[in-house]
Amino acid sequence: MTETRQRPRPTTTRVRSGSVTAAGASAAVARSRLAPEPSAPRRARPRHLRVVDPQLVKRQRRARRLLVGAGLLVLAGLFAMVAFHVELAEGQMSLQKVQQETAAEQQRYEASRLNVASLMSPQRIVDRAAALGLVTPADTILLPGGTEAKKHVKVDATKPWETAKPELAAQP
Amino acid sequence: MLVLFVLMGLALAGLSARLVDLQGVSSAKYARLGLDQRIHTVPLSAERGSVFDRNGEDLASSLTQETVVADPAVIRNPAKTAAALAPVVGVPENQLLSGLSNRQSRFFYVARKVDATVAAAVKKLKLPGIEFIPESKRFYPSGSLAAPVLGFTGTDNSGLAGIESGFNSLLTGTPGEMRFEEDPRGREIPAGSSQLKPSKRGDDIVLTLDSSLQFQAEQVLEGEVTAAQAKGGIAIVADVKTGDILAMANVDGGDATHPAHPAAATEHNRALTDVYEPGSTNKLITIAAALEEGKVGPQTPIPVPSSIVVGGKQFTDDEAHPAETLSTTDIVRQSSNIGTIQIAKQLGKQKLDQYLRAFGLGRTAGTMFPGEAEGILPDVSLYSDTSMATVPIGQGLAVTAMQTLDTFMTIANGGVTRPPRLVAATIDAAGKRHDVAAVAGTRVVSPQTAAEMTDMLSQVVSSGTGTSGAVPGYPTAGKTGTARKPPYDKPPYKYVASFAGFAPKDAPSLAAIVVLDEPVTAIYGGTVAAPAFARIMQEALRTKDVAPSGPDAGRSIREADLYRAPTATTAATTAGATAATAAPGTTGAKAPGTP
């Protein structure tokens, strides 16, 4: 706790200027001489002007800054929280949207797979072949087995031509 | 004034007590009640696993469809709503009106599992009180292909027959649920608590069936059932080395209104669930047992009289003949009943029963198919006086078509059983494949016996009762079977005709069996079942890339000559002999129309 020192202010006597006459002045002097002297000089009440401790000012400023800083920090925190919450909500919505899209695509994939399976069913292929005019061949050639039999070679079209050509030549 | 203070004090005390109760003593209870009111639980059904063939083709798969439901309490004009919905969903208007008018109910199924087009049309109507819920629906993209094998599911997606039923727990998966908080108006509370327990998809099942071969087998069998005017037919093709069942066809015979057609999913998979008396195909076990026990050799001469009496009953061969001596091979080639009974006498009933069971009769084939039959194999102690005449020739016992094929696979596999397999693998929800381990086989007869038996069976096809079973380009081994169905002595007589065999003879790759129930145009396995066997086997060998190796290899054969259609003469001379067997309770009965 710092002690505040205050200097006693000098007492002043106010003299009315202007209309003061010599007789009046002498009467006032006479009254002042007749009046008893005060036992102790009266301490004057401190007024607005004072000498401020520079350390105190520093501390006050620091405290004020800290307070403002903390306030700003709280505000920023609150803002960040709101922003984070908004971001979270947006993310959740995006996630839900993606999940819905994934489910829809999964559904589409499964429907397509089912459709492909239906199209690939043997009965459908036979019906389609018949509709296109395909018939069972009149002759069946039984290829000889053993070492002379050549397996059907599957040509990989992604290979370079010089690699794929020999494979093509191996086709019956 | 004092009274007022007292009253206020009491009121405050009451409020305080209630507050303590709400926030302290019973807080958990009220919190739970509140949560129960707010929390809404949505069950998440698990998607049913798919069923694939061995090549990964979809045989059964599920797709989420929309079910149209209504809240009758919300619908103000049920008649108008029913009139608008009926033509779109295809449900009778009066049926809809009845359900929509029941205002006591808050839920009514308008139409379950409708396709996307119908769902879109209903949504377009924008009818109040009409909502949609997703439900999984089972589809079989190949239609009736292998339908009795696959089975079917009910509306609640639970398997009711076939593989769908037998592997239901595996296919079903584990349902999940979603829990979230909602306000009194049923809206989800933003940032409220929510829990998601995802459902676990059911495992997929990979069958050993080959879709293409299955289709071929069904087509050929359908044609043969139609031609023979049979009541029905069964065909099975299996891989000799692995035991994998590549095709399992069931066909229903036609009638005045419907042509023959592949059996529906609601019918039994007769290849595994129904039994029949095998007839002469069962002679394979009798002869193989006698060979293995050293009672006879392939060329051992056996006296074969014109008839034989066992237990007071007379047994004859299909064709009348004087007393003669036949080798074991000839007995098999001609399918002689008397010769087989003579050999069985040498074997004895204990040994016969031992080999019948060792070959797999009297127990399930082990395919894990629901309702698979064990067959009927009488205990030796229950044998009648005639049993040692009937059982060796395939009467007086009952087997499934799979069991008969199993015996041929054992011979084709060098004398070691090859337990059949219908399920190749399962694929879990994570996509990991778990192969179903093949069951190890057990040796029944020696490789030498198996080789000798194979040679005899090949003579059945080359010059015996089963020439129609010859597969062009592939040396084939097989055996005919013709068995009269009970009642044995009451006309009109009914028969089961069959042919089982394997090819190529020297390096067996595939085995197959064709069984025709109650054929009309001809009754013999060699006449009606063998040609179907040859066609199916030809397709199967080609599908499996087995190169031709027989005398026909390299030749060009006219399609018309590919499968030799038996003439009247050949039909008579190559017919299976069991049909003329004196079945239990009969004396020397001869099949009608037998030469």
Image (cartoon, coloured by chain):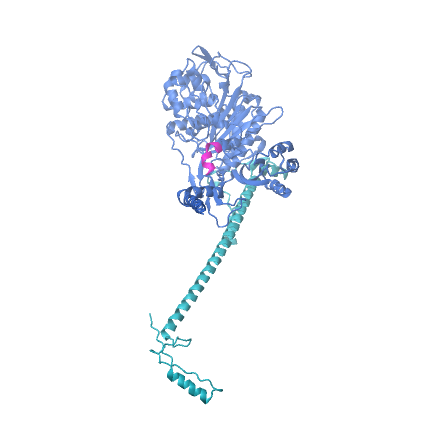
Please state, as top left, top right, bottom left or bottom right, where the N terminus of chain A lies in the image: bottom left
Where is B213 relative to A171, above or below?
above
Q: Is residue B472 left or right of residue B303?
A: right
Q: Is residue A5 visible?
A: yes
Q: Residue furthest top?
A: B312
Please state, as top left, top right, bottom left or bottom right, where the C terminus of chain A lies in the image: top right
Is residue B166 in the magenta section? yes
How many labels, in total? 0
Which of the two residues, B575 or B54, is positioned nearer the viewer here? B54
Chain A rendering hue: cyan
The spot of residue B82 in percent (x, y) is 64, 36
| Residue A68 lies in quadrant | bottom left
Magenta stretch bounds: B163-173
Which of the two residues, A152 or B125, is positioned nearer the viewer here? B125
Magenta stretch, main secondary structure class: helix
Is residue B115 in the magenta section? no
Q: Residue at x 51, y 54 (%)?
A: A90
Q: Is residue B19 left or right of residue A105?
A: left
Which of the two residues, B9 or B123, is positioned nearer the viewer here? B9
The spot of residue B42 in percent (x, y) is 50, 41
Q: Residue at x 53, y 24 (%)?
A: B516
Which of the two residues, B385 or B454, is positioned nearer the viewer here? B385
The spot of residue B526 in percent (x, y) is 52, 24
| Chain (blue) | B
The spot of residue B364 in percent (x, y) is 43, 27
